[in-house]
Amino acid sequence: MKKLASKGLLMSALICGNVLWGGTTVLANEVQEYDLDAVVVTATRTMKQIQEVPASVSVVTSKDIEERNVTTIQEALQYVPGLYMNQAKAQDGQIMLRGMDTSNILVLIDGVQLNNAYKGEVNFDQIPVEAIERIEVLRGAASSIYGGRAVAGVINITTKEATDKVNGDVVLSYGSNNTWKKSVQARAKVNNKWSFGVGYENSSSDGYRGYYRTAKAKSGTGTYSANLPVLSDGKTYVYGGRGEKQWKTENYNFNVKYSFNDSQSLKYAFNRSESEKKYVNPFSYVKDAAGNPVYNGTVTTQNGNKITIKTKDFFGYDNIDIRNIHSLTYNDEKNNLTASMSYAKDQISGFSSAPDGVTDINWTGAGDLSDHPGELYSLNIEKAWENVGNHTILVGGNYKQEEMIQHRFNLSKWHDHDSKLNEYATDSGKVKNTALFVQDEYKMNDKVTMYAGLRYDNYKKGDGHFWKDGAYDTTSKGESYNELSPKLAFDFKADENTNYYVSYGHSFNPAPMFEIYRYGGSGMGAVIPNPALDPETSDTFEVGMKQKLSDNTKFGINLYRIETKDKIAYTYFYNAAGVCTHKQYINYNEEKRRGVEFELNHKFDSNWSAYLNYAWQTGKTSGAVIPGTNKNQAYSGVADYTVPKHLLHSGIEYRNDKLNVLLDCQYVSERMSPDSATGEYGAEDAFFIVNTGLNYKLAKDVTLQFGITNLLDKEFYCKEATAGRTYNVGLRYSF
């Protein structure tokens, strides 16, 4: 296994070169392009140049998506300062912003929450990148107007709308691992009153081997003998894996808009996404005397000790997710009024698995299904009054209800989710949130603008119900919380080219519903619900500067500190004999995060441009002793090694009328303790990769696209193995 020389690569990388919920279009409908003077709607919810916004904001446009030749939203977002995309699990939507995952990031699509009710995670495959007009990324606390999840920030995705003529995109692409994408997106304005959009995308991949199986050796001898890869501890052996992780997704979207007049409109939008993921072709490094792979038994290693392998461990899960999203939005641009309602339903969301005692690697018989569909209802209304003296006042309200239910079934065929025999367990719960918020944008003088916001949340956990055939049938009592989330920010305009800002924000983030209401089984062991789980609360302090050095050069820098209380921890509980009796999510520790983010963009001339952004971030946790648990030692200021300490992105781009070429470099530091081994399975390696993208116009409306990810074919691990060098070639027809 190759080693990654991380320190020198950091220098190589340097050489390389509020949004409205449903009402973004009320104040920013005409904003089409991002440049150094881009106008955005961010935490202030008023139209402002990025230069004047008292927060750290980035914009990704449809033009950026095309020119960088990205195929997923995660890839488009990875260029943003302070954002980390897991290279091994990008297809699973795993990103981090300021070291926090998507349960702490509010993700919106045209005002509708994409975070699911079950875990707060986001399936970015729901949204074809060809349908995206722009993405605004707000970093920092935004709960004063967005409520829960907006701790690390807000990612708002705005889709394209019809113009005066029929327009759209047809994309066909093929890449490494037999990866296909076929997409058609079309929009049309029928007349002054009616317009619509429709789209379909199908993507699939055979995947690659990334998930391996390991076992720790014990003394003794086994039935078989094998020379196996061994990890740095000298006791852990890699004996095989689940095989390739195949995936496929289908997405259908439709919208229709009726314009009452030039300023008032009503829009209905529908999105349906279907995705499947499964492992195929399991493999074993252990062979019998005839050279056939062995999947079950005991093995004597080359070092004379013994490991045990089980057939079940070579199986993965068969995941199926089907989600429907409906939204209805009323916009009154003249009066700055927006009202919207949405409904998201996870029709199917779960996985099946083979039984524990299986010994046949080709097993197609009985198994288990865990299906946890969720529902989310949301109603929003807000209105802004501009130029009330020196004030702009925004007032709004929001009602949201989320529901989780987990069904567990016995299956006659574990690959077939429809082969249900009987339901043997059910967990369910519901949460409701009612909120009112107000924000005052007060221009104190020509230099200073103050933004003061306050949100009141009434969060209620409903009764939970927990049932397992022949074991238990219980309920939990609901509980209510009241929380105030203030936000205060000042923007100081030093001169025409320089702005400073300082801000404070309080965030209120309820636990994901599976941590409150779910019993865990199978390989998880005895995980029990915690209906008494309190929300996490965070306070964020930030100071920053933005400066235009010239018409072609802009840079920004900010420093932040986040203090989180009642942080939720996965905890093991033991009896007097030291045997684990159950596991549970509890409010346990506190965390303090600090970070610095730097961004520089420069246009050399009409053809050449370059960018550089860097983030330094760290998290430290503290906790007290809880007797009878794995939290048996108090600790203070212990580093959170899951947070990448250094993130660097740099690149250079060339454009002319027909050709666009991008060379992008990315460095990410290790995400593990300094004394941990690198360059082996299970490690969170530092890595430096180079990506390229090329677009060439074959005709006015036809573009040939070509891209290479990890051009230098660096081998590294993000817990699991990564894919190495991959290619992608495609044709885009725009009309």
Image: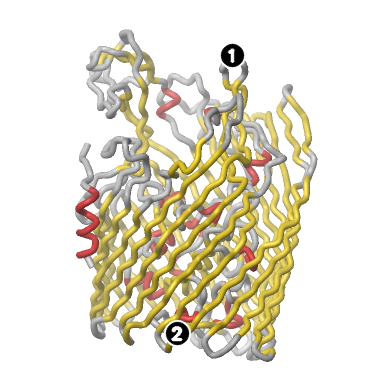
Compared with residue 399, is residue 300 higher up or lower down, i.e. above or below?
above
User: Whole-percent x and y of residue 413?
Assistant: 54, 30
Q: Answer left or right for 664 relative to 33.
A: left
Q: For the residue labelled by badge 1, is the local secondary structure a helix, a strand or a loop?
A: loop
Q: Answer left or right for 100 relative to 386.
A: left
Q: For the residue labelled by badge 2, is the local secondary structure a helix, a strand or a loop?
A: strand
The colour scheme applied to this rendered structure is secondary structure
Image quadrant containing the N terminus? top left
Residue located 53% across and 48% down the image: 591
Taking depth in this image into account, of 378 and 350 the one nearest to the observer is: 378
Pointer 2 residue:
494
Q: Is residue 481 at least partly visible in the picture?
A: yes
Residue located 47% across and 73% down the image: 134
Q: Answer left or right for 164 relative to 667.
A: right
Q: Amino acid at mark 2?
A: Ala
Compared with residue 524, is residue 732 higher up or lower down, i.e. above or below?
below
The image's mark for residue 395 is none
Number of dots carrying numbers: 2
Q: Amino acid at mark 1?
A: Ala
Pointer 1 residue:
577
Compared with residue 333, is residue 454 higher up or lower down, i.e. above or below?
above
Taking depth in this image into account, of 616 and 162 the one nearest to the observer is: 616
User: Whole-percent x and y of residue 363?
Assistant: 45, 26
* Mark 2 or 1: the one toward you: 2
Residue located 48% across and 57% down the image: 125
Q: Earlier in the sequence, mark 2 or mark 1?
A: 2
Distance CA(mark 2)–CA(mark 1) = 66 Å
